[in-house]
């Protein structure tokens, strides 16, 4: 088993940078929390401090009755200073420099205590306990750093020594010296305890913030992973649906090939039988009704042959070649494939296209575009319960070097917010399981691949019109062969300007 070596320098540097960034962020969080904590508690502590400075006047009555009036005035003055400080700290400047005010607040009552010592010239007074109380109470109730605790402790000790100068100059008895020394020892000890406690407390809080931040980062990472897993699961579900749909289309292609083969042969035999029957009827003229029935049978067989031909072209891979063909052939193929749905819904499809109007493209793909657009129109009108007559008008106009095709229905229309998204993949307004949202996006890609443009126009309540703009085929001599595909000669057909298919 290989032993793991030391961390690479890059890894150590990355870990160090991450730790520094985490510490900096934890410091910012600590500062923000200290501000909230201090501003919330400063008012309470200030009111308590002002109250204690004023209330302890009762001690002056027993300890220094000769100075009771002076001390009372001083107490009320310093209590007013504390209240003024509470007003200032609520200002913008006070909130910005709130740490300064946390150090100033304990120094106000401490300053009152040292003034009483200076006036009474009594370094051994019990009032020094007020100095310890200021350091301890504020030091542990506020989130002081060890530096702030050290500054306040040194300031209180300096003020106490300064207040003892008059008594020292006049001379003190051994008892007073002992009291002074005792008070200094206790003040130094109190300051040391507060500084050490602030340092330990600060370190603990920094570690707490780091741990809290690491936990927050892990929660964010878990949340991001959860969202990513949800997106991945949704994408997998959509991909699964597409695969199922692709499987259906593949099965349909195989089925179509089988149906084309199985139906083609009986159709050919039926057509031959009809040919013989017609010849016999010509040789032996019979009833006119029989002739009409035979003609109807012939027409039905011809329609089935057209459908079989359309299926063959639509599913045949060799049809994915650019050819020059009359656009009406793709329209007729689409109408024939949707014939049953058109008839069942009572929809009238009107085609106003010049039979000689040609485009260059992949014939079965253009048929697929018309199938999707006509099918969508029929479904939209049927779902909205559009009143009869339900109509779909298909027209085409050639202008300059382009052909404009328009498919217009009298259905419910498409709202503006939906029109902006209709060509986006997987966008659909149908219920789950009714559509994949790929039909119009496929149409968009097919038309774009033909160097054309597809647009949708609607007033949102009475009609929808899809406009296809495709480039006209370039003029080609009859003996030339296009390098991009096979050009079939145009079939001769009777003039057709407008036909209605119901």
Image (tube, helix red, strand yellow):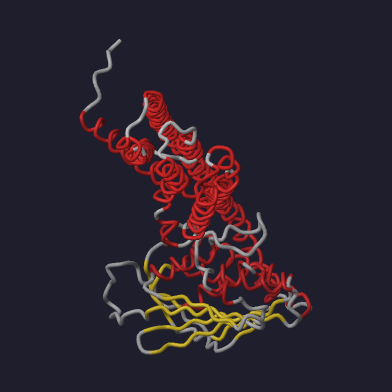
Label count reads 0
Within the image, what quadrant is residue 287 found in? bottom right
Residue 220 visible to an observer of this rendering? yes
Q: Where, quadrant-wise, is the N terminus in this rendering?
A: top left
Choose between 497 and 244: the one closer to the eye: 244
Q: Quadrant of the C terminus?
A: bottom right
Left or right: 40 in relation to 21: right
Front-most of 229 and 412?
Answer: 229
Residue 248 drawn above or below residue 17: below
Q: Is residue 196 visible?
A: no
**Left or right for 443, reference 483:** right
In this rendering, would 350 be left or right of 328?
A: right
Q: Position of residue 142 (x, y in %)?
A: 48, 41
Which residue lies most toward the top here?
1
Residue 296 position within the rendered picture, expressed as x and y whole percent measured from the top left: 71, 74
Considering only vertical position in the picture, is 282 above or below 199? below
The one of 80 and 331 positioned closer to us in this rendering: 80
Front in this rendered view, residue 249 or 234: 234
The structure residue drawn at horizontal position 45% and vertical position 78%, both measured from the top left corner, is: 326
In the rendering, at what x and y percent does residue 480 appear?
26, 75
Residue 407: image x %, image y %? Answer: 56, 79
Q: Is residue 205 left or right of residue 83?
A: left
Residue depicted at 63% across the width and 80% down the height: 460
């Amino acid at each position: 088993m290989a032993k793991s070596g030391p961390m690479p320098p890059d890894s150590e540097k990355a870990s160090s940078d991450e730790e520094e960034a985490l510490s900096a962020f934890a410091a910012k969080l600590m500062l923000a929390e200290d501000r909230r904590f201090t501003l919330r508690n400063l008012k309470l502590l200030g009111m308590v401090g002002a109250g204690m400075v004023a209330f302890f006047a009762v001690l002056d009555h027993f300890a220094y009755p000769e100075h009771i009036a002076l001390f009372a005035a001083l107490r009320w003055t310093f209590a007013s200073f504390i209240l003024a400080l509470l007003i200032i700290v609520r200002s913008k400047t006070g909130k910005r420099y709130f740490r300064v005010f946390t150090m100033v607040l304990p120094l106000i009552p401490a300053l009152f205590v040292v003034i009483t010592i200076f006036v009474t010239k009594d370094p051994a007074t019990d009032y020094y306990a007020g100095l310890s109380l200021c350091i301890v109470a504020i030091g542990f109730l506020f989130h002081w750093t060890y530096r702030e605790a050290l500054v306040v402790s040194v300031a209180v000790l300096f003020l106490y020594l300064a207040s003892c100068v008059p008594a020292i100059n006049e001379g003190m008895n051994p008892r007073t010296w002992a009291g002074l020394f005792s008070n200094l020892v206790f003040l130094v000890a109190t300051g040391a305890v507060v500084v050490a406690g602030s340092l330990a407390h600060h370190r603990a809080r920094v570690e707490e913030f780091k741990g809290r931040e690491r936990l927050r980062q892990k929660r964010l990472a878990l949340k991001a992973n959860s969202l990513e897993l949800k997106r991945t699961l949704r994408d997998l579900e959509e991909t699964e649906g597409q695969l199922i749909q692709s499987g259906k289309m593949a099965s349909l292609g195989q089925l179509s090939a089988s149906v084309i083969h199985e139906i083609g042969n009986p159709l050919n035999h039926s057509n031959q039988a009809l040919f013989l029957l017609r010849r016999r009827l010509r040789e032996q003229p019979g009833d006119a009704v029989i002739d009409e029935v035979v003609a109807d049978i012939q027409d039905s067989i011809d329609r089935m042959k057209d459908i079989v031909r359309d299926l063959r072209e639509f599913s045949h891979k060799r049809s994915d070649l650019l050819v020059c063909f009359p656009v009406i052939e793709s329209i007729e193929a689409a109408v024939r494939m949707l014939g049953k749905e058109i008839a069942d819904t009572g929809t009238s499809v009107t085609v106003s296209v010049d039979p000689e109007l040609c485009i260059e493209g992949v014939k079965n793909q253009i048929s697929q575009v018309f199938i999707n657009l006509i099918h969508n129109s029929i479904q939209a009108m049927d779902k909205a319960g559009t009143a009869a007559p339900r109509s779909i008008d298909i027209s085409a106009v050639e202008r300059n070097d382009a052909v404009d095709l328009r498919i217009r229905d009298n259905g419910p229309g498409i709202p503006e917010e939906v029109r902006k998204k209709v060509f986006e993949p997987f966008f659909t307004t149908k219920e789950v399981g009714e559509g994949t949202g790929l039909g119009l996006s496929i149409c968009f890609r097919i038309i774009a691949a033909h160097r054309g443009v597809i647009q949708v126009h609607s007033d949102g309540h009475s009609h929808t019109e899809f406009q296809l703009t495709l480039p006209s085929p370039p003029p080609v001599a009859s003996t030339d062969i296009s390098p991009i595909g096979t050009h079939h000669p145009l079939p001769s057909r009777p003039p057709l300007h407008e036909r209605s298919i119901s």
